[in-house]
Image (cartoon, rainbow, N blue to C red):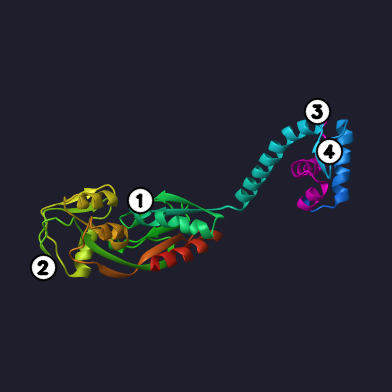
Amino acid sequence: MSHLPPLTALPAFEATARLGSVTAAASELGRTHGAVSKQIKHLAEDLGGDLFRKSGTGLVLTERGARLQEALSPMLRRLGELATELRRGSEQQVLRIAVGATFATRWLTPRLPRFYATHPEVEITLLMSGLVAGQPRYSGQDFDILLSYDRLRGPVGPGFHTVVMGDAAYGPVCAPNYPFEPNAAGGQVAMRFSHAGGPSAWAAWEEISGRQIHSPEMREHPHHILALEAAAAGMGMALTERRLVAQDLEQGRLIAPLGFVHGKDGFLAALPNHRPAPQAAELFLDWLRQEARA
């Protein structure tokens, strides 16, 4: 490797060249005027000639100094940027959240900027998940927190401890012009939509609501969001949690002709029992409770 100049003197030279004054450079670097002058002198001696010359009350670069500044300034700037990135990386906490695609798309993701605004040190990684026969699709080693809003589909399952995030509300939704006439028995519809792992939710909703909806068949979609879009297109009714369709209801894309049935403590966070929760988990859960209340 070529003989390098005194590395500790380079910040003193760069600051003086940029600010045009040893005094200003010393103030920026938190050093004394004498210390900065000594470092610049040592650097000039090592490089074989003056780097500055006096001009009025200030300093200007010599040709030798200008060449050094041209090479040094971008190097120091990039080094500072890299140092910031590395420091941030060492402090960054990654939190893996398993969540259904519909809940992530329609509720959680639009709110995450508010979390990052207050906790920039935490990075959220979303893993698409769901419940199949009441069991999480991912093992506890794959995620730190599983978010579950659909108590109609059963409990989260063994191996987890749950933390209540808030209540939930469930009801069927359809397009405003869908030919559904509610009556005392609940009504008659041409088609009901469900999604993978969720056909039993209709039966659970009928039990807790005391209403019945009769249809010749149940059509299952691979994702809940597809069932909701089919309902918005006027093709039938989909059973959902109110948070997922709040914007659709407000915009008039969907209506809830039978309203929503309240489910106390229906919105849960599940954490694996076999290992301690990451430090960032409590920050995220506290924030999530506030969002759920709002």
Q: Looking at the image, tell me whether mark 1 or mark 3 is earlier in sequence order.
A: 3
Please state the extent of the stretch shown in magenta in the rendering.
Answer: 1-28
Q: Nearer the viewer, residue 153 or 23?
A: 23
**Label 1 crowding class (10 Å Cα cut-off): few <14, some 14-19, many 20+?**
some
Say if 50 sits above or below 33 in the image: above
Q: Looking at the image, tell me whether mark 3 or mark 2 is earlier in sequence order.
A: 3
What residue is pinned by disc 4? 6
Q: Which residue sits at x=60%, y=48%?
A: 89
Query: Residue 185 got which mark?
Result: 2
Residue 44 in the image, given as x and y percentages of width and height: 87, 35
CA distance separating discs 4 and 1: 56 Å
Q: Are marks 1 and 3 in contact (CB under 8 Å)?
A: no
Closer to viewer: mark 1 or mark 3: 3
Q: Which residue sits at x=10%, y=62%?
A: 181
Query: Residue 101 got which mark?
Result: 1
CA distance separating discs 1 and 3: 56 Å
Residue 291 in the image, given as x and y percentages of width and height: 42, 64
Q: Secondary structure at mark 3?
A: loop
Q: Quadrant of residue 76?
A: top right
Query: Residue 2 got which mark?
Result: 3
Q: Quadrant of the C terminus?
A: bottom left
User: Given the image, on which type of amino acid does mark 3 rest?
Assistant: Ser
CA distance separating discs 2 and 4: 87 Å
